[in-house]
Image (cartoon, rainbow, N blue to C red):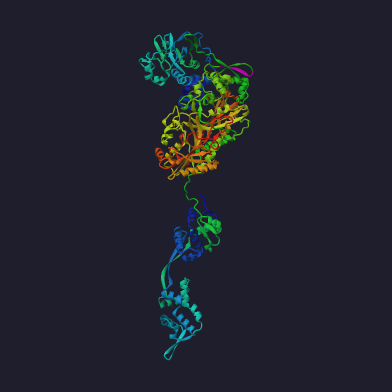
């Protein structure tokens, strides 16, 4: 989630509100969490759905509206010139085909402004820009640009002086040497998108601007350029950016974007409309408000209004509110404006029957019986390493569900059996009193040719100086007796167990699990010095919810897929 | 620490209580006997215990300051060789008169066939005692009996009686002493030796202890000690034979330490999960469980999360190495089409949509990153005749987080949905408040929140005594973009419960890794937690 730092004095100046408490209250209403306050600096965590709030200008605008603080000028709709004077030509731009530009004139820029611009840019990069992949922003000193401006793709050997550097570098070099180049190099493949003016390249989106057009305290006019892979997102980002900068003053000038076959004018700040039914609000929230009340709620959230009839309003959505997709988004804003604390919680008068899942019922019985036999329940991770599932268990080949993007070798697959986890557990508790009797009930997953099978297993381990097959078999027989299931054992060979002391557990001719004494070689692999006997069986196979499908359990027709 | 009261109500000193608990049955018996008897011999006789046992008990009770023991030295008389002999065969003088009376009271000495001892000792004593007299007739000597009560003298001859007394250990009387002295002069009949006599009596503490014991065992008659049987253990035989009704059971030191048992129990986290399940089932929610290996479609697309949503990035979702799912296994063609259209242009939901959708991504296999995947799967199975419906799940989810004190790759979520035409946001808050109250949380506050698939969204904070406000109840109403494509026109209230966090609070742990603790000692010793604090 975006975390921003604000200066309290800035917030008070921009909101025209003196009370810090009032400002904090509003920030919370806008889903902001105040993380810390250090002197004048407050750290706020905001949600990514409202990119317009991710700067002091935008947040203050929202807070101002919320408390009905009037300004002399509106924030949109009247500050831009009708006819663009500047054109940007787009030629052969394939990797980031969509652009949008704007010019803002007559600004007074100080250090705070520059800092705010950088923060705004960064916040938009992360959110709407999807880390610059979807949208990237460049802001330049317009007076240092010599038109015509061309957006195109060039060879990686072309050069410019990137920001914070003193000498020319080729675009290729920038990707290797410049910190921003290194950070975002994966976003540039063979083609190198650039903005060029008469003097050469002044921007290398989505990586870095040129030093030549750097914005500083003497800058009066800004040239804003965006590039991206999604037209709507590029234009929305520009809208948010422009509206927030204009909170500082200035005059917007549109820019004509000339594609080879067509042209368009950016930014397009024409507000969108959405029709809201007051009854829909009342029904969804469970309150009863009038049209007049609804209008007040809407205004406080910065919306324009056009009343249609007694129950319907056309809501005019400011161009920076790019998050509004559906009337429910406006309804939530109205609810925030109404105040969550003003809603009285109430239980509905609907009747339903509560019941546990059959899987939980079955597992509850297994758990109870094992605890009755003195076993301690343990809970381990279902993610583990391929090595501990196989090699350490003396197994050469097995169907293991691997993770595509593991974050460490220790957890690079989903377990297909629980026994290795229990052995690891035992190896970490050699100092504890013996006998150690533990069990776990949990998921295993087995990728077979036809599908991935997810099953739930019960695994039991007994360890002490004389732990034997008999110990495990006693548990099996008693457990199954308690559950009313008839099992049979069949001699079997398994590399993890001592040959001749391992068997397959069968219910109605279906293999459900394994029982046996762990092979000393495996014990050594796990650094265990005590004999261990094991029982592991599949007790059910959960399915995705579907009408008429009964959960398969080992009582009827279930085969352990991990065997 | 409690103490057993004495009859008069004054409390017993703690150490005395402990002393009583530790007394051996023999000590208890001896202690009781000492109320009336004092010597080893008496106590041994009255209790039926061997002298050695009594002496041991004296020693042991003395050490505990329950009795004082007096030792004095006295002479003890015993029969010597001749004495033993006389006891068996009578004194020689007795034998003389016995033989004489058998021969009619008069006889030639030779005819009596007296042994040497009878002749030398017996005859002279018989004469001295005046029992017989000797007359010389010619060369022969005739012995003549002067008394008539020979039989009486055989059994009641005072020296003989004295021998019997000494042999049997009967107490000697004063008048016996002269006779004793004279017998001693006859030599090798009686010998005496100096022995130690041990006499015990109860101390003040001992008396107190005795009273407590009498109280404990309800002993009234301390004279009948032989019948006071004290045992350590109740056995099957004692029960079956009915002997228990005559027995006293040795009291135990109830404060004595014992070893702790190792017993099986649920995982502490499981304990919490089961408590939560009970509450939700009680609130009319139906539980569902489903496989955590999912397909992107249900984990994100059906939740109207755009294809390029950051939470779908490889840094936020685990992808598994398996071919993508075929469309027919994901959902019906109808739902697939609706979801696609909703993403692309809003379809019939009233939404603008995202303007794009990546069907290939939707088919990729992943590990579920939120149980909401299951909630929407359930929704897709519902039709109007199933309503109203309340469903919940508590299940495992996965996120590629580096493991540290606050992050795990695996975590549990609890979430529920309420599907009905007759519910609204006010009811959602009602459920959240009720769930919180079910766990004894009195204060809940609600704040606006953001979740990609609910609008309006809310988060409930609960008040914890020590930790203050905890963010615990994220919730909201599913967006129409989520419900309409699944054929649901009813309102769907959805809420989650931060159960990892809740469990940490209940278990009093700061490090989330302890929830999956590999420490057997911790699991064995952890007290059984409860969200209700019981």
Question: Residue extending furthest bottom?
Answer: B138
Q: Is residue A310 above or below residue A410?
A: above
Q: Position of residue B319 (x, y in %)?
A: 47, 27
From the top left corner, tell me how far across and down residue A392 is, in percent: 41, 36
Camera sees residue A118: yes
- Nearest to the observer: residue A384 or residue B466: A384
Give the extent of the magenta segment.
Answer: A310-316
Which quarter of the figure has residue A393? top left
Q: Is A548 a magenta residue?
A: no
A248 above or below B164?
Answer: above
Say which quarter of the image contains residue B453. top right
Depth check: give the residue in front, A54 or B7: A54
Residue B135: where, in percent of width, then height? 44, 89
Q: Main secondary structure of the magenta part?
A: strand
Residue B221 image offset from top left, x and y in percent: 55, 62
**Count of numbered circles in the view:** 0
Task: Note whether residue A65 is visible.
Answer: no
Q: Residue furthest right?
A: A310
């Amino acid at each position: 989630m975006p975390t921003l730092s604000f200066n309290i004095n800035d917030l008070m100046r921009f909101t025209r509100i003196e009370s810090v408490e009032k400002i904090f209250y509003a920030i919370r209403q806008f889903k902001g969490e105040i993380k810390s306050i250090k002197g004048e600096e407050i750290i706020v965590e905001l949600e990514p759905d409202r990119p317009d709030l991710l700067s002091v200008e935008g947040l203050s605008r929202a807070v101002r509206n919320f408390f009905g603080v009037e300004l002399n000028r509106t924030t949109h709709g009247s500050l831009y010139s009708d006819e663009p004077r500047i054109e940007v030509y787009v030629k052969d731009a394939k990797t980031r085909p969509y652009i949008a530009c704007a010019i803002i004139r007559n600004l007074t820029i100080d250090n705070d402004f520059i800092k705010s611009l950088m923060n705004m840019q960064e916040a938009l990069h992360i959110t709407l820009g999807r880390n610059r992949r979807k949208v990237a922003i460049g802001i330049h000193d317009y007076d240092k640009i010599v038109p015509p401006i061309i957006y195109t793709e060039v060879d990686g050997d072309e050069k410019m002086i990137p920001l914070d550097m003193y000498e020319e570098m080729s675009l290729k070099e920038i990707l290797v040497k410049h910190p921003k180049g290194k950070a975002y190099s994966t976003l540039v493949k063979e083609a190198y998108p650039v903005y060029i003016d008469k003097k050469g390249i002044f921007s290398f989106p989505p990586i870095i601007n040129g030093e030549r057009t750097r914005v500083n305290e003497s800058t009066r006019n800004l040239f804003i350029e965006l590039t991206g892979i999604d037209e709507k997102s590029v234009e929305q980002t520009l809208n948010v950016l422009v509206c927030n900068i204009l909170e500082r003053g200035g005059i917007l000038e549109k820019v004509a974007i000339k594609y080879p076959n067509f042209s368009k004018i950016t930014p397009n700040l024409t507000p969108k409309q959405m029709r809201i039914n007051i009854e829909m609000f009342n029904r969804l929230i469970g309150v009863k408000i009038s049209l007049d009340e609804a209008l007040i709620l809407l205004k406080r959230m910065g919306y324009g209004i056009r009343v249609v009839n007694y129950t319907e309003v056309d809501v005019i959505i400011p161009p920076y509110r790019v998050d509004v997709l559906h009337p429910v988004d406006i309804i939530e804003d109205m609810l925030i404006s109404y105040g969550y604390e003003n809603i009285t919680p109430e239980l509905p008068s609907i009747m339903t029957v509560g019941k546990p899942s059959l899987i939980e019922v079955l597992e509850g019985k297994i758990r109870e019986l094992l605890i009755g036999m003195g076993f301690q329940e343990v809970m381990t991770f279902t993610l583990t390493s391929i090595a501990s599932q196989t090699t350490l268990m003396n197994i050469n080949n097995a169907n293991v569900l691997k993770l595509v993007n593991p974050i460490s070798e220790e957890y690079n697959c989903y377990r297909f059996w629980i026994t290795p986890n229990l052995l690891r557990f035992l190896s970490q508790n050699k100092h504890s009193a013996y006998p150690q009797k533990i069990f776990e009930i949990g998921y295993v997953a087995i990728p077979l040719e036809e599908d991935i099978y997810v099953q739930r297993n019960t695994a039991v381990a007994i360890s002490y100086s004389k732990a034997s097959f008999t110990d495990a078999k006693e548990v099996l027989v008693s457990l199954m007796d308690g559950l009313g299931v008839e099992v049979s054992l069949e001699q079997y060979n398994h590399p993890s167990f001592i040959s001749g002391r391992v068997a397959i557990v069968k219910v109605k001719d279906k293999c459900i699990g394994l029982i046996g004494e762990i092979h000393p070689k495996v014990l050594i692999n796990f650094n265990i010095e005590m004999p261990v006997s094991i029982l592991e069986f599949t007790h059910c196979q959960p399915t995705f919810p579907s009408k008429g499908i009964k959960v398969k359990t080992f009582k009827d027709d279930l085969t352990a897929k991990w065997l | 620490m409690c103490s057993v009261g004495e009859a008069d109500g004054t409390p017993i000193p703690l150490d005395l209580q402990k002393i009583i608990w530790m007394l051996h049955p023999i000590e208890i018996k001896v202690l009781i006997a000492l109320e009336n008897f004092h010597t080893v011999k008496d106590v041994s006789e009255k209790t039926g215990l061997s002298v050695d046992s009594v002496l041991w008990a004296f020693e042991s009770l003395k050490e505990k300051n329950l009795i004082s023991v007096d030792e004095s030295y006295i002479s003890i008389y015993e029969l010597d060789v001749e004495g033993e002999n006389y006891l068996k065969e009578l004194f020689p003088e007795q034998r003389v008169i016995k033989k004489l009376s058998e021969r009619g009271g008069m006889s030639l000495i030779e005819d009596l066939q007296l042994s040497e001892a009878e002749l030398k000792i017996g005859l002279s004593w018989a004469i001295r005692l005046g029992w017989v007299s000797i007359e010389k007739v010619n060369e022969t000597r005739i012995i003549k009996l002067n008394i008539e009560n020979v039989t009486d003298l055989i059994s009641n001859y005072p020296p003989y009686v004295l021998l019997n007394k000494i042999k049997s250990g009967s107490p000697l009387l004063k008048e016996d002493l002269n006779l004793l002295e004279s017998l001693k002069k006859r030599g090798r009949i009686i010998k005496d030796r100096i022995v130690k006599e041990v006499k015990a009596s109860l101390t003040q503490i001992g008396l107190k202890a005795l009273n407590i014991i009498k109280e404990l065992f309800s002993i009234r008659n301390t004279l009948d000690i032989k019948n006071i049987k004290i045992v350590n253990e109740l056995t099957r035989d004692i029960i079956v034979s009915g002997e228990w009704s005559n027995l006293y059971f040795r009291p135990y030191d109830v404060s004595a330490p014992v070893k702790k048992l190792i017993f099986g129990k649920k995982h502490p986290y499981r304990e919490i999960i089961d408590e939560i399940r009970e509450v939700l089932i009680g609130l009319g929610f139906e539980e569902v469980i489903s496989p955590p290996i999912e397909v992107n479609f249900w984990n994100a697309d059906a939740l109207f999360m755009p294809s390029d949503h950051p939470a779908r990035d490889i840094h936020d979702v685990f992808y598994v190495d398996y071919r993508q799912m075929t469309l027919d296994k994901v959902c019906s063609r109808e739902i697939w089409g609706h979801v696609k259209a909703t993403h692309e242009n809003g379809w019939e939901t009233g939404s603008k949509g995202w303007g794009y959708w990546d069907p290939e991504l939707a088919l990729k296999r992943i590990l579920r990153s939120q149980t909401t995947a299951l909630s929407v799967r359930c929704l897709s199975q519902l039709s109007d005749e199933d309503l109203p419906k309340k469903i919940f799940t508590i299940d495992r989810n996965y996120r590629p987080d580096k493991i540290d004190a606050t992050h795990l790759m695996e975590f549990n979520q609890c979430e529920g949905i309420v599907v009905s035409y007759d519910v609204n946001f006010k009811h959602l808050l009602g459920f959240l408040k009720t769930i919180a109250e079910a766990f004894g949380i009195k204060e809940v506050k609600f704040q606006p929140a953001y979740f990609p698939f609910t609008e309006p969204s809310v988060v409930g904070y609960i008040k914890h005594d020590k930790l203050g406000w905890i963010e615990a109840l994220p919730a909201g109403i599913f967006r129409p973009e989520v419900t309409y494509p699944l054929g649901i026109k009813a309102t769907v209230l959805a809420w989650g419960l931060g159960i990892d966090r809740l469990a940490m609070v209940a278990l009093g742990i700061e490090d989330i890794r302890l929830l999956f603790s590999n420490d057997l000692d911790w699991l064995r010793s952890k007290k059984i937690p409860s969200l209700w604090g019981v």
